Every structure is written in structure tokens, then in C-alpha cells.
Amino acid sequence: MLVRELNTALHHFLETDPRVVVMGEDIADPYGGAFKVTRGLTTAFPDRVLTTPVSEAGMVGVAAGLAMSGYRPIVEIMFGDFVTLAFDQIVNHVAKYPAMYGGRVTCPVIVRVPSGGHRGYGPTHSQSLEKHFLGVPGLMVVAASPFHDPADVLGALLQRDEPVIYVEHKLLYAEPILRPQGGRIGEAIGREGGSPDALPTVTLSFVDRSECAATVLAYGYTALLAMRAIEALAIEEEVFAELVVPAQLAPMDWGPVLESVDRTGSLVTVEEGMAGWSWGTQAAADVGALRFGRLRRPVTVTASGPGVIPSSRSLEREVLVGVDQIRDAVREACR
């Protein structure tokens, strides 16, 4: 499960890299964090796993100072919704220090944000706010997915000098990491056509790729929902699409997406964030411009409805993007 693999990865990096420091609210044993990702860390590394006061801005500010002093801090925001309280520190400080100081410093802070809904947690504990960080100069936005090994992703991020927002959908914590083997259904194609500087993008198909009539671009938990929708369409209706899952949302590496779209001729984007001014709309603009005249149809942007996320589970399902909505969008794109 993702929660176990993240925990193991954090143990490993704390053990092997003395620069790594983990910070957050209520992360100390025996509680081990709201989602138990940090369980056991304060027992094993009491000097480098620090439970903090309830101040997201404070902890990110301290992490920035540590990062500029040579450490590799990893900050856990208890719920991703609360990252707004650290917005000033992230956008106006952490992301800008290298440029403000003429490249003489780096500020490699990793901010982990457990995000997303489908658990009935209500308006202020269920949001996917990553779109508010997309396009911030100097800031990477990365999303955990069932198709990317968290140890590989965290290991790569700890070797880079950019600050990172690392989005972890809460429902993924109980999901296994899928590691497809070459040649099988769901083959991981990898960084095909992509930038060597970007984190790997995984491409999956349930049939021969030449038979796919649409590309579905999704990340995080929505990638899992998209996989289920694509599989159901393939089995029940013989409608075939290919799934492209990036780990890195910004800066975005369009190479693997374009490689797929060039074969399928259509694109559907999927995200759990609210519709409008989003990652999907940027994908539609960029891919539409780069492949103008070559797409069979306009890019379909699939996202959650506008509005506050309800606490009621039944009402929440009406707002948040789900398998049925993805399935309808893919079916239409394959026509």
C-alpha cells in the first residue's frame, strides 16, 4: 500500500542521508501523523523527525532555512487544504530564494500534501488545490500515483535543488503500487518521447496501442479511476483508449502525451480539482496548440464540478469526478 511504501521510503532516506529532516504536526509516535505515513520515524530518528506547533507557515519557513543551510527537509501538511496557510512561504519565499539571491542558494523543500475527497470529510478537508501552485516559477508540482514507486520519486526529488509540492491523494494510501511488467496488459511504457530531466511518465494500454482511439491523461487517484473506466470500456464495449500518467505536473513534460496523441488523435484530461483554470485546461491549450489541425476533436477536460465539496457522501459523489463521468468522456472521445 502507498502508506506503507511511503513510510518505508522515509525510513530509508532518513537512514541513508543525514541531510533529510521530516517535520509536521502530530507526526510523533505513537500517533504517527493523521494518515500514519510517519509512524515509527520519531522513535528511530528522534533528532531529525520534528513535531511542530500548529503553524503551516511556521514549519515551511523553518524548512526553508534548513534547506538553504544544506538540509533536505520534508514537510507534512496534515490535510492538503491547510497548505493555503503556507501559501506565502511557498510562493513568495521558498520558490523565489534561488533567483532572489542570484543562484547562490538553493531551497529544496519537499511539501507533502494529503489531498482529495471521496471520504465525506467536508468542504475544508477534501479539496485538491494543486492547481493553485501550477506555473509558479521555480516550483515543481508532483503527484503520487498507483503507477509510480514512491521511493523512486522521493529519491529523485531529494537529488534535485527545486522545491516541490508532492500531492498524495488520501484514497491512494490504502491502494497497492502497481508495477506492470513489460509485454503484459497495462505495460509501463515509461519516459517515451519525454525530457530526460522530468520524472517518468507511465503509459498503459489494455490492447495493442495501435487500436486505441483516445488518449486519457490523468494523475494521482484519478489515474486509478481512469484505468477502471478504460478497462470497463475495453471489456464491455470494445472501446479502446490509452492511459498516460505523469508523476510531474509542473513543469509538464508534454513528450509522452504528444507521442500518444499522435497515434490516437484525441485527448481526454482527468483531474479531481474543480473545473476551470486548471491543469486540464492548460493541457488543452498546450496540446491543442502543439497539435493544431491534427486532433480529430477538441480536447475534453474532465474535472469535478464547481462549488463547495459537501460533507454528505451522496452529495459529494455528485460533485467529485468519478468513473462514470470519465467513462462517458472517453466513449465520446473515441467516436
Image: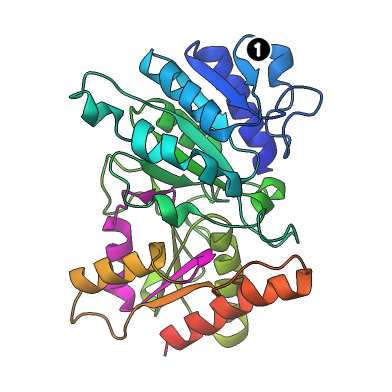
Residue at the spot 48% in from the left edge and 80% down from the top edge? 330
Q: Quadrant of residue 315?
A: bottom right
Depth check: 176 or 158 in front?
158
Residue bearing mark 1: 45
Residue at far bottom of view: 335
Q: Can residue 239 be seen by looking at this rendering?
A: no
Task: Give the side of residue 224 with respect to residue 121, left or right.
Answer: left
Residue at the spot 26% in from the left edge and 80% down from the top edge? 295
Task: Give the side of residue 311 with respect to residue 242, left or right.
Answer: right
Magenta highlight on residue 295: no
For the N terminus, the quadrant is: top right
Depth check: 29 or 267 in front?
29
Image coordinates for residue 117, horizontal then vertical, percent: 66, 59
Image coordinates for residue 253, horizontal then vertical, percent: 30, 52
Depth check: 306 or 282 in front?
306
Magenta highlight on residue 253: yes
Q: Quadrant of residue 266?
A: bottom left
Q: Residues within 10 Å of mark 1 (few under 14, many from 20)?
A: some
Q: Is residue 55 above or below residue 181?
A: above
Q: Mark 1 belongs to which amino acid?
A: Phe
Image coordinates for residue 140, horizontal then vertical, percent: 37, 42
Residue at the spot 62% in from the left edge and 70% down from the top edge? 320
Give the colour scheme of this rendering.
Answer: rainbow
Image coordinates for residue 161, horizontal then vertical, percent: 33, 27
The residue tagged with tag 1: helix, strand or loop?
loop
The stretch of residues the image draws in magenta is 246-275
Q: Is residue 192 above or below residue 335?
A: above
Q: Can residue 240 be seen by looking at this rendering?
A: yes
For the C terminus, the quadrant is: bottom left
Q: Is residue 277 above or below residue 166?
A: below
